[in-house]
Image (spheres, rainbow, N blue to C red):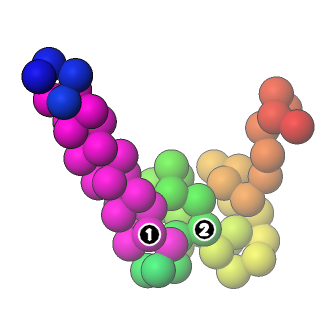
Amino acid sequence: MTDLIVISILAVVLGLAVGYIYKEKKSGAKCIGCPHSKTCASAKGGCCSCSCGERGKGES
């Protein structure tokens, strides 16, 4: 019974996260983690101070 509750909670959290990502991408956000993603220059193909259009140095 406990396993069922844990799986249900994880499924709800995962579903909410996917729904949020879908909603943000549909509304035009280029990078969801950036607070300026809809208004910064990267949304127009450029670069901004938050570097939401660039990959981090540690990422490959």
39 vs 13, nearest the viewer:
13
Relative to 57, residue 27 above or below? below
**The magenta stretch spans residue 13:** yes
In the current view of this chain or complex, which residue is farthest to the front?
1
Point 44% across, 69% down: residue? 22
Q: Is residue 32 left or right of residue 52?
A: left
Point 41% across, 58% down: residue? 18
Point out residue 7 in the picture as x, y percentages from the top left corner: 27, 33
Point 88% across, 37% down: residue? 60
Report the amino acid beneath label 1.
Tyr
Q: Is residue 17 left or right of residue 60?
A: left
In the current view of this chain or complex, which residue is farthest to the top?
2
Can the viewer see residue 49? no
Write the start and end of the magenta stretch as one range: 5-25
Point out residue 57 in the picture as x, y percentages from the top left corner: 84, 32
What is the quadrant of the N terminus in the image? top left
Look at mark 2 in the image and give the residue it sits on.
30
In the current view of this chain or complex, which residue is farthest to the right?
60
**SS assignment for the magenta stretch, majority:** helix
Look at mark 1 in the image and give the residue it sits on.
22
**The magenta stretch spans residue 43:** no
Q: Is residue 21 left or right of residue 60?
A: left
Q: CA distance from mark 2 to mark 1?
A: 12 Å
Point out residue 45 in the picture as x, y percentages from the top left corner: 76, 77
Point out residue 23 in the picture as x, y percentages from the top left corner: 38, 72
